[in-house]
Image: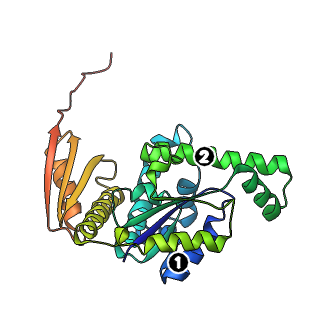
Amino acid sequence: MNIVAISMELGSEAREIGKRVAGALGYRLIEREVLLQAAEKYAVKEETLAQVDERTLSFWEKFDEDKRRYRIFIESALLSFARDGRVVIAGRGSPLLLREIDHALKVRIVAPLEVRVERIMAREDLGHRTATLRVKAHDKEQATRSEYFFGVDWARPEHYDLVVNTGRGSLEAAADLIVYAARMPLYQPTEASLQKIRDLSLACEVEAALAADPAVGNLHVEVSASSGIVTLKGVVFSPATMEAAAAVAKRVEGVVSVNCEVIEVPRIYPGPMM
């Protein structure tokens, strides 16, 4: 029931390797399914979610409440797949999102720049300069996204259990390395690690439920979960607001009880504008 989470560079052949790993392990390969599930569950068009998930947001878009909600929906869907285990998750920041899950094998697949450029030239029938610009632009966009969503540099090796260079050797050999690592006792689930992924998934499901609710959708609260006990922490203008959020959280499957830790900020009436 373990998880293989793969971070992909453009031109590294990570997607093909992910398919081989999933086939060898008998796991499900998760790619577009994350967006499809999020779109169906939260009634958002897949194309809309893809815009948030697959490109860097502009400065003003980072403050867009709809896009914040869409990102929560995507993470909730991804974590639900990870919670069930026996999956290879390709991209979508999965190694960083699952960085605290011990039985998730976090893999980064890389290749030298020139190798990646040559692959993109052949695959997309591009000239050398155009292919180089495309690869570098993709790298920059990925770096910007990981910094914004996770606060880390996605390229740093310490975020991964295994870094595989596809610039040498065959894709089959690269897949074999990952399969071997995934079968090691170190990456097999324990009751503690399974509980951690259940807690993480439930907390994100509650976040998504709050984000989808018209009454409290704009409320920014920190959500944590422990064996079905959910805690909401936040700053509100009225206790009634947090009570409404708690009511929404209680409706999420798997929630046993809800605790609220509230800092109340009184509304200050500034008086008539002169």
Q: Is residue 94 above or below residue 17?
A: above
Name the amino acid type tagged 1. Ala
Which label number is shown at residue 22?
A: 1
Tell me: residue 96, above or below residue 152: below
Task: Name the amino acid, label 2.
Answer: Glu
Residue 36 visible in the current orientation: no
Q: Residue 42: x and y, percent?
A: 41, 67
Q: In this image, 113 relative to 173: left or right? A: right
From the viewer's perspective, is residue 113 above or below residue 229? Answer: above
Which of 15 and 181 lies nearest the eye of the viewer?
Answer: 181
Marks 2, 1: nearer the viewer: 1
Cα distance, mark 2 to mark 1?
27 Å
User: Residue sitting at 24 percent across and 21 percent down?
Assistant: 271
Residue at position x 69%, y 45% in the image: 136
Q: Residue 49, position in %: x, y?
A: 52, 60
| Residue named by callout 2 | 141
Q: Quarter holding the N terminus? A: bottom left
Dividing the picture into quadrants, the one containing residue 237 is: top left
Left or right of 46? Residue 250 is: left
Q: Neighbour class for label 1 at 10 Å: few (<14), some, many (≥20)?
A: many
Q: How is the image coloured?
A: rainbow
Horizontal side of 190 relative to 41 (left or right) equals: left
Residue 99: percent from left, percent from top: 38, 56
